[in-house]
Amino acid sequence: MARLIGPAQAERIRYYTGGRLKGQVIPNGTACPLYADPQCSEPADVRSLTGDLLAAPGEIPQVLIADTLEMPLFQFPDTDDPVVYTRILGGPVTALHPDPDSRLDAGLAAVAGMLATLAEFELSMPAASPVTVASAGAALTLPDQRDAALYVVTLTASTCTLTFPAGVSGRTFSLQLKQATASRLVTWPVAVRWPGDSPPLLSTASGAVDELSFRYDGVAAVWRGAYVAGYTS
């Protein structure tokens, strides 16, 4: 039987489940150990997409949250009903499942095709640089630059009403909001959705910076947002 690959898309973005960070997305670089049992005592029989072991025999394999804030794909155990378990940063144990339509041969072919397409696309595009807005004012439409991966915006009015670029399925960008002076607020576009349907509370100190990420869901026609981190400067 060919191994399935996963996790399923709905399980790839992980969120904090308690404390002051509850509902916020777990950042890139975070280790996600993979276990064979819900007691988290046995290593899972998992492989990389190219078939390599993810840990030495007897050790617990792990993957790292990618820059896209998603768990990377890997091969699940070669069983009739493959499932693995993870426990991240001391949170609860959660089960991970493969995509039932992701047989390895089809998955690898799709990955190879996407990598080739991405390489061609990157060669044809200029290097992306941050789009900086030094003074947002009371209303700001983010410039619609399709290669923009980061917007850096300084909030200068008491409240700034934001308008996002045109939604394209799968489009992502990061947004850094800096407080010019204390307690500047943002009114988000109506098409933005948040974990738990609750917008994050921005930092209030003068000079503080909040970083957020957004991905356009073309099926639901909404921007799915996640609060990444807050900084004092």
Image: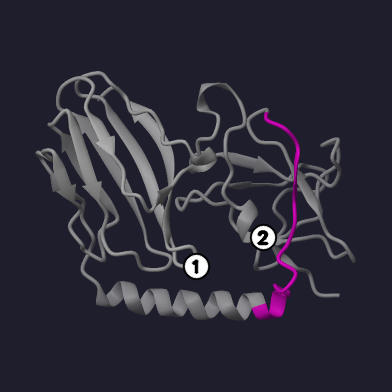
Residue 230 as seen in the image, left or right of residue 182: right
Task: Give residue 8's mark.
Answer: 2
Closest to the observer: 7 or 177?
177
Quadrant location of the C terminus in the rendered image: top left
Tell me if I can see residue 29 in this picture: no
At mark 1, the secondary structure is loop
In magenta segment, residue 92: yes
165 shown above or below 15: below
**Residue at image location 46% in from the left, 53% down from the top:** 68
Residue farthest toward the right in the current orientation of the protein:
80
Q: Main secondary structure of the magenta part?
A: loop
Nearest the camera: 212 or 56?
A: 212
Residue stretch rendered in magenta on the structure: 91-106
How far across and how far down the image is residue 171, in percent? 38, 63
> Which image quadrant is residue 31 in?
top right
Magenta span includes 200: no
Q: Residue 52: x percent and y percent?
A: 69, 62
For label 1, the crowd category at 10 Å Cα-Cα, with few meaning under 14, some 14 to 19 and many 20 or more, is few
In the image, taking residue 211 as reference, residue 1 lies left or right, namely right
The residue identified by callout 1 is 219
Left or right, 103 with reference to 183: right
Examine the rendering and report whether any part of residue 42 can be seen.
yes
The amino acid type of the residue labelled 2 equals Ala
Identity, as a three-letter code, of the amino acid under mark 1: Val
- Marks 1/2 in contact by CB < 8 Å: the verdict is no
Say whether disc 1 or disc 2 marks the residue closer to the N-terminus. Answer: 2
Q: Position of residue 175 (x, y in %)?
A: 30, 45
**Helix, strand or loop status at disc 2:** loop
Residue 74: x and y in percent read: 67, 60
| Foreground: disc 1 or disc 2 | 1
